[in-house]
Image (cartoon, helix red, strand yellow):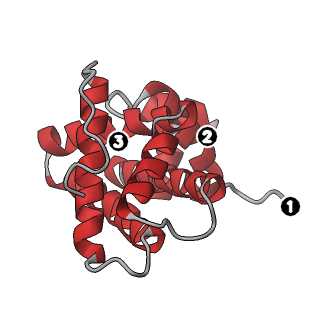
Amino acid sequence: MIVPAGPETYLEQLAAHVMQHGLQNASLRPLANAAGTSDRMLIYHFGSKDRLVAQIAHHIASIVRARLNTSLPQERAQSRRQCAEEVMEQISSEGGRAFLHVWFDMLAMAEREGEVYRSIAGEVIGTFHDWLLLRLPLSDPDPEEAVQRILVWLEGNLVLKAAGSKTILPPDFDL
């Protein structure tokens, strides 16, 4: 008996395609080709292109979190600075850059196309926020503030890097 493929079956191929080709130009036919199915089957399984994009974004975020979990020490960071430096090193690595391309695409789509993509971006950053809370030292006096500062520092430096700037803010820049 042949069991029809479900949405989970496609996510690995879809995520690989989006990480290679970007999210902004992801239309249904190329995505369907990457997954070895039809655009109609993608809509059948995911309900809409927006839900498909959301699932791909969440899947990519889970890949990034898994990579961070395996590449960083198991124990919590000793300081905000250490936490920020470790995450930046991993995200800036060869494997992390494909994620950054998708993330920047997602942010551009959130700004240009509105609430659906803004919601997806918010959910992705929310899961990363929660992950960072688990990396901070237990002794941090204000973990929520620390996460916000680290996220701003990471995003700011990633934007500067993407723009070719040699000016990178040091991790002790008001973390």
Q: Which residue is mark 1?
A: 1
Which callout, 2 or 1, points at the residue further toward the start of the chain?
Answer: 1
| Residue at 50 percent of width and 38 percent of height | 96
- The CA distance from mark 2 to mark 1 is 24 Å
- The CA distance from mark 1 to mark 3 is 40 Å
| Residue at 30 percent of width and 25 percent of height | 162
Identify the image quadrant of the C terminus: bottom left
| Residue at 50 percent of width and 47 percent of height | 42
Front-most of residues 163 and 86:
86
Front-most of residues 119 and 44:
119
Mark 3 or mark 2: which is in front? Answer: 3
Residue 35 picture quarter: top right
Which callout, 3 or 2, points at the residue further toward the start of the chain?
Answer: 2
Residue sitting at the far top:
164
Q: What secondary structure is found at the residue carrying circle 3? A: helix
Q: What secondary structure is found at the residue carrying circle 2? A: helix
Front-most of residues 106 and 72:
72
